Amino acid sequence: MQAGIRQTCLFTVVGLGLVVVLAGTALAQPNNPRFGTWKLNVAKSTYAAGTAPKSVTFTSEAAGTGIKSTVDVVAADGTVQHWVVTANNDGKDNPLVGTNVQDETVARTRVDATTVKMIYKKAGKVTSTQISVLSKDGKTIAITSTGTDAQGKTVKSVAVYDKQ
């Protein structure tokens, strides 16, 4: 896989990372300000040259004591991805269902009221780590993602999402 495409795939999981950010409490509540539709603000985000996705939109909602997120991505190369995940903030791996070519599972852990840490894996190997922070006003989420590209080089992005 070309390095640029691999980096793009690595950072498209940022959209999925919002799944973690949106689960601010152990008990999901319908009025949780983290629930709703979020859209990537490419202009406010930072990616390696040529790797920024064209768009990422996700919707999150309560699912029992966890959160269900549906993610739609158009990668830098035009590849369309769609996946769904339901998870809690318990640090356990949860399967990604759909066309996320980079990862198979995500485990999330709540750090504090506005911050969640996510670990993404494929074939049991960590592909990226993300720290997601919800703004105090609840209108934006910033996700810092660190991973390794196909050449073993560390890559980093910061994706900013606006609540719709």
Image (spheres, rainbow, N blue to C red):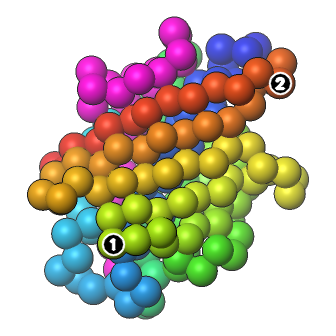
Label 2: which secondary element: loop
Q: Which residues are magenta?
A: 41-63
Q: Which residue is mark 1?
A: 113
What amino acid type should be assigned to the residue bearing mark 1?
Ala
Q: Nearer the viewer, residue 163 or 77?
A: 163
Mark 1 closeness class: few <14, some 14–19, many ≥20 residues within 10 Å: few
Question: Gap between marks 1 and 2, in whole Å?
Answer: 34 Å
Q: Is residue 90 above or below residue 129?
A: below
Q: Is residue 66 above or below residue 111?
A: below
Residue extending furthest front?
112
Q: Quadrant of residue 162?
A: top left
Residue name at image x 27 percent, y 21 percent = 43
Residue 75, image x, y percentages? 51, 26
Residue name at image x 86 percent, y 57 percent = 124
Residue name at image x 53 percent, y 77 percent = 89
Q: Which residue is mark 2?
A: 152
Label 1: which secondary element: loop
Residue 6, image x, y percentages? 70, 24
What amino acid type should be assigned to the residue bearing mark 2?
Gly
Q: Nearer the viewer, residue 139 or 73?
A: 139
Q: Is residue 80 visible?
A: no
Disc nearest the viewer among 1 and 2: 1
Residue 149, image x, y percentages? 74, 25
Decide which of tag 1 and tag 2 comes sooner along the chain: 1
Mark 2 closeness class: few <14, some 14–19, many ≥20 residues within 10 Å: few
Horizontally, is 145 left or right of 93 in the view?
Answer: left
Residue name at image x 18 percent, y 59 percent = 136
Q: Is residue 116 above or below residue 30?
A: above
**Quarter of the image that includes the N terminus:** top right
Horizontally, is 64 left or right of 61 in the view?
Answer: right
Q: Is residue 128 visible?
A: yes
